[in-house]
Image: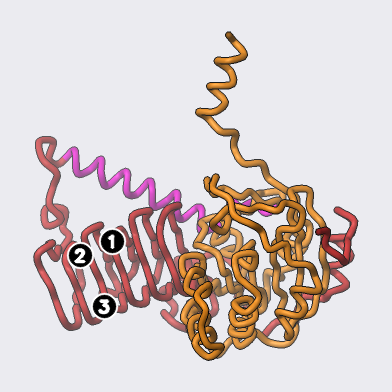
């Protein structure tokens, strides 16, 4: 009886999302110099904690929030139209290139053609040496139907606060898949994480 | 480690919340039976049914609950875009608070606050930027004091973060060796994905 009540209670109040260690993200943030200007392109939705994090530095933070428009890249279309659709998701071109791009788990939600189109348009907003951070599903065959919303913690770990229970197949891109689909980028580092993700640091 | 809750933006957010709370308290005190109108609080107001096409300038605080297309310049005052307000304009003010919808650039000499009900498409330039969870924003947030000063003048820096000004030199990329060195202490790196 008590066990049944406890299980029922547990169903009604899902556990708070657990933080996970993201060493490459942490090491990136630790090394952003306080006395030098940085331009950060964030593909995710705006997050107060991320603003707070970069607000302590000399930063311009470009919020692309591409999640809502990713469906437009799923439709079959000509390469030129796909490039145009990818361009429409990104902030306008600035004279000043991005030093760091935060993809979070967005790349999992793009097929190979869309991945190439979007990352090529992002490349236009970067410079040689720009770093690109991404989280790629590697162990689980399924993933949430929508990109996550990741919140950095004081200790440098990340929490995905998205309450999305619906699942879809994960593409589980290998490093070779990513290298082929993102020809301008090289893998600087890749690390397996305990939550079924692989953390990547690319360099242009 | 990052002291996320202690940054200027978060402090500004808390400060704004306190100010908003104080304002609400003041309003209740002034008119216990009904909420005070913006005019009774010394704030000019553009009502819900008002639509303005053109440039707005002045020297008093302004609350916008209607529609404005053009430019809003109140450089020494506060501008509040209410939850019913719809702005397609660049806004220059001492402080900007958004509860409604904005398509345009926001320049705050002291701060820009984006509330949870807000939708903003445009760029923000201010020494302090606070944003509540749930707000929708797409654009750039310029928080570099040097760049803010260049865009807004000395007034922005006077109330901005107390940081040593540095020349705006383009940084060199993060050295890969430094990144590798630290990260490798935390977990074993791998170079091939499973599956």
Q: Is residue B96 above or below residue A23?
A: below
Ranked by sequence position, the earlier of labels 2 and 1 is: 2
| Magenta-highlighted residues | B1-29
Q: Mark 1 packing: few (<14 Cα in 10 Å), some, or many (20+)?
A: many
The relative height of residue B96 versus residue B142 in the rendered view (above or below) is above
- Chain in red on the image: B
Query: Contact (CB < 8 A) between labels 3 and 1?
Result: no
Label 1 resides on the chain identified as B
What residue sits right under mark 2 in the picture?
Answer: B64
Q: Name the residue at 52% across, 58% down.
A: A47
* Magenta segment includes B165: no
Find disc 1 in the rendering and name its residue: B100
Q: Are marks 2 and 1 in contact (CB under 8 Å)?
A: yes
Q: Disc 2 sits on a residue from what chain? A: B
Task: Left or right? Give the position of A146 relative to B63.
Answer: right
- Residue at 22 percent across and 43 percent down: it is B26
Instruction: Kindly report the secondary structure that dominates the magenta region of the rendered protein.
Output: helix
């Amino acid at each position: 009886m008590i066990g049944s009540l406890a299980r029922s209670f547990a169903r009604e109040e899902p556990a708070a999302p657990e933080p996970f260690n993201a060493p490459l993200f942490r090491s990136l943030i630790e090394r952003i110099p306080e006395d030098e200007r940085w331009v950060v392109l964030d593909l995710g939705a705006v997050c107060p904690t991320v603003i707070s994090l970069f607000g302590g530095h000399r930063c311009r933070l470009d919020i692309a929030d591409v999640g809502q428009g990713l469906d437009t890249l799923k439709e079959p279309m000509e390469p030129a139209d796909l490039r145009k659709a990818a361009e429409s998701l990104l902030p306008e071109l600035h004279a000043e290139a991005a030093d760091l791009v935060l993809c979070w788990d967005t790349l999992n939600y793009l097929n190979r053609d869309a991945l190439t189109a979007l990352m090529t348009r992002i490349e236009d907003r970067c410079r040689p040496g720009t770093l690109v951070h991404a989280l790629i599903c590697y162990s689980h065959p399924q993933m949430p139907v929508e990109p996550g919303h990741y919140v950095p913690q004081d200790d440098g770990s990340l929490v995905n606060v998205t309450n999305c229970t619906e699942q879809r197949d994960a593409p589980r891109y290998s490093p070779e898949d990513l290298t082929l689909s993102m020809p301008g980028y090289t893998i600087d580092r890749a690390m397996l994480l305990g939550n079924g993700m692989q953390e990547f640091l690319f360099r242009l | 480690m990052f002291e996320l809750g202690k940054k200027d933006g978060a402090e500004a957010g808390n400060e704004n919340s306190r100010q908003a709370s104080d304002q609400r308290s003041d309003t209740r005190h002034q008119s216990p039976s009904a909420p005070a109108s913006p005019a009774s609080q010394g704030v000019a107001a553009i009502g819900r049914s008002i639509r303005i096409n053109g440039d707005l300038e002045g020297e008093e605080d302004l609350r916008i609950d209607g529609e404005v297309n053009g430019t809003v310049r109140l450089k020494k005052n506060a501008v509040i875009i209410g939850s019913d307000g719809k702005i397609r304009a660049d806004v220059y003010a001492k402080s900007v608070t958004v509860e409604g919808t904005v398509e345009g650039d926001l320049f705050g000499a002291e701060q820009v606050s984006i509330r949870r009900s807000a939708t903003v498409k445009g760029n923000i330039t201010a020494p302090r930027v606070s944003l509540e969870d749930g707000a929708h924003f797409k654009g750039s947030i310029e928080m570099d004091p040097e760049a803010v000063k260049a865009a807004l003048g000395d007034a922005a820096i006077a109330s901005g973060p107390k940081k040593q000004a540095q020349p705006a030199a383009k940084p060199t990329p993060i050295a890969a060796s430094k990144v590798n060195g630290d990260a490798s202490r935390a977990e074993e790196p791998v170079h091939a994905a499973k599956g």
